[in-house]
Amino acid sequence: MTGREWFQQELSRLVDPDESSRTAARRRADDILRPSGALRRLDDLAVWVAGWQRSPSPRIDRPLGIVFAADHGVAHAGVSKYPIEVTKAMLDAFATDRSTITALARIAGAELEVVDVGVDHPSGDLRTERAVDDHRFDECVDAARRVVESVATDLFVFGEMGIGNTTAAAALAHALCGSAEEWVGRGTGVDDDGLTRKIDAVRTAVSRVEGFDPLSILAEVGGLELVAIAAAITAARQRSIPVVLDGYVVTAAAAVLHAIRPDALDHCVAGHCSAEPGHRRLMTHLGLTPLLDLDMRLGEASGAMIAVPLVRMACAAVTDVPTFAEFFGPST
Amino acid sequence: MTGREWFQQELSRLVDPDESSRTAARRRADDILRPSGALRRLDDLAVWVAGWQRSPSPRIDRPLGIVFAADHGVAHAGVSKYPIEVTKAMLDAFATDRSTITALARIAGAELEVVDVGVDHPSGDLRTERAVDDHRFDECVDAARRVVESVATDLFVFGEMGIGNTTAAAALAHALCGSAEEWVGRGTGVDDDGLTRKIDAVRTAVSRVEGFDPLSILAEVGGLELVAIAAAITAARQRSIPVVLDGYVVTAAAAVLHAIRPDALDHCVAGHCSAEPGHRRLMTHLGLTPLLDLDMRLGEASGAMIAVPLVRMACAAVTDVPTFAEFFGPST
């Protein structure tokens, strides 16, 4: 089965949340020893986790962050503040626990894995050629499935690393949602000339894919780690494990799934709203409401990782706190 | 020395943050192995902690939540959804680790203390009499000072428990900031009739204190735990330990200090914006920008506690991650 066929098959038979677990968790949340609705948004989060964990007692004991990393042919077109070699250097920083995301994961109580789907082996230049050919598309889907289907976790956090990948994200968002400049931001901090080049690159790329279906758009103007992220989100769904999405790039990959089936992201929550302006716009399009809004624009799963303690606390506040009846004894 | 004299003395000689630690932490944050400014708000938080911890390497290893609890004479006036006895029941829930705040503190890695400054011994009814007489005012200041000056911690989280205390908070906010109804909300969820009684109570109380100084307003229309919280915030300042503020009640107590000296809250950050409508308005008045906005209205320090992992992560992202020079070696 090709990666494309796998997406089509899984998206045609998506796992649904367990309604009885949701109902039981909601009933419990409404009767916990505190004013009903006092933790509204956190209660909603706990009920959401309960449905996907298929348990009336949601809890997060083993959160796992996965950073998908790859290089981009378009990185040579002057669309980023940083040279393409930075992707590889950051992989070294992740592996040796000398990075922002590893420091954040430690405090969040999360494990971290990095999946290299093309560092030092860039995708095609999305301006002029298909970014991800069929063979590499299949490889990325397989790599994502292998890790997501094998690890022990109760909450996924998906992130990315790849110099040039906000250009790919903007191209995806533009191709899937229409209009143009409004999807392009400064990424890691490109200057005005770079921003102009980035807008041109996105325009050129998107002009190549008019009328294409979402998976073809992903292959043409996305990137290797974006294919992997879309596959990882889908594989997590089929394991019924909830997902915290990171910033613009991850959300752009998620948008491909949403374009195929609007309910494909029901098991996902948005960790944060990044400073990249397209991110908020894209989340609105997808119906996602971010948990945090702290003006971050790092990637690496950082914006999702800072939301992990909130999800853990939301679950604890329903599962580990007594109800009025449990505390005071049953009323007669 | 009376409690009032202590406030006046300390507020006249407030400790300032250490500027050299701030500068060093800022320089480090700007050179960490990530795009400059990628964690803007978290970097600002880390720099703020550095200044108050008087260290270029900010870190939160021992966060401590303190819940100040007391009862209110006005609770008998039908201004709350819950009877006054609930305050005492919640103290039992805190002590036996069967409460929302204890569950949240566990995930945040924080210790929790509860300081009873008047449970079962309500303040006066703020509608018609001074809520806190001189003797009890002094006791509350002493109790808060004793705990804040003795504990080992690197981050304080202050919260409260007291049926009726959002009425006191609204009266304080109204008396300190002017206007009327806009400061009164539903607290734990009072119905329309209760809301009307609450607005009347606040109006009546505030009419008694026109032209009073802020500490007199605190004593007249505040409450025992609000006096203690104002003292705790001041004592933390003098130990140069940063503080995360909880919701409306804590912020109203803080507003008393701000009315005396606008820089008195420089060592405080707002954990969250609660669903109580006066809270956002009051924070705007005080120049505080909340870290989280999740529609919570529980008190118990809960809205501050959910922000603790963010502060911990902000510090780790500056202190535990190498700079470009440390990672790549010094450039020549």
Image: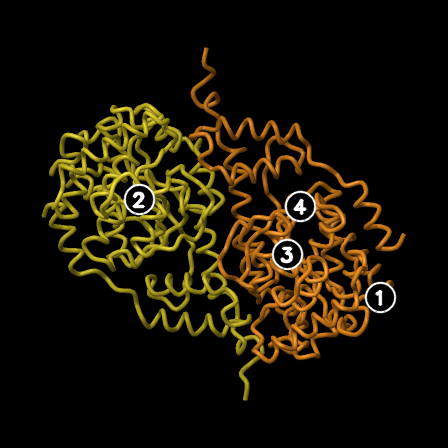
Chain colours: A yellow, B orange
Name the element at disc 4.
loop
Closer to us: A14 or B188: B188
Q: Tell me if mark 1 has few (under 14), some (14-19) or many (20+) residues whose alpha carbon lies within 10 angstroms of its own.
A: some
Name the element at disc 1.
loop
What amino acid is found at the position of numbered circle 2 in the picture?
A: Val
- Residues at discs 3 and 4 both on one chain: yes
What amino acid is found at the position of numbered circle 4 in the picture?
A: Thr
Q: Which residue is mark 4?
A: B153
Q: Which residue is mark 2?
A: A250
Q: Are marks 1 and 4 in contact (CB under 8 Å)?
A: no
Q: Which residue is mark 1?
A: B133
Hey, which quadrant is residue A78 in on the image? Answer: top left
Name the element at disc 3.
strand
Please report, as a chain letter, where disc 2 is located: A
Name the element at disc 2.
helix
Image location of residue A136, percent across then percent down: 15, 36
What amino acid is found at the position of numbered circle 3 in the picture?
A: Leu
Q: Tell me if mark 2 has few (under 14), some (14-19) or many (20+) residues whose alpha carbon lies within 10 angstroms of its own.
A: many
Total marks placed: 4
Q: Is residue B286 left or right of residue B209?
A: left
What amino acid is found at the position of numbered circle 1 in the picture?
A: Asp
Image location of residue B229, percent across then percent down: 72, 56
Q: Is residue A275 left or right of residue B131?
A: left
Please report, as a chain letter, where disc 1 is located: B
Judged by depth in the image, the label closer to the viewer, 1 or 4, is: 1
Task: Tell me, for residue B112, which label it has, or none.
Answer: 3
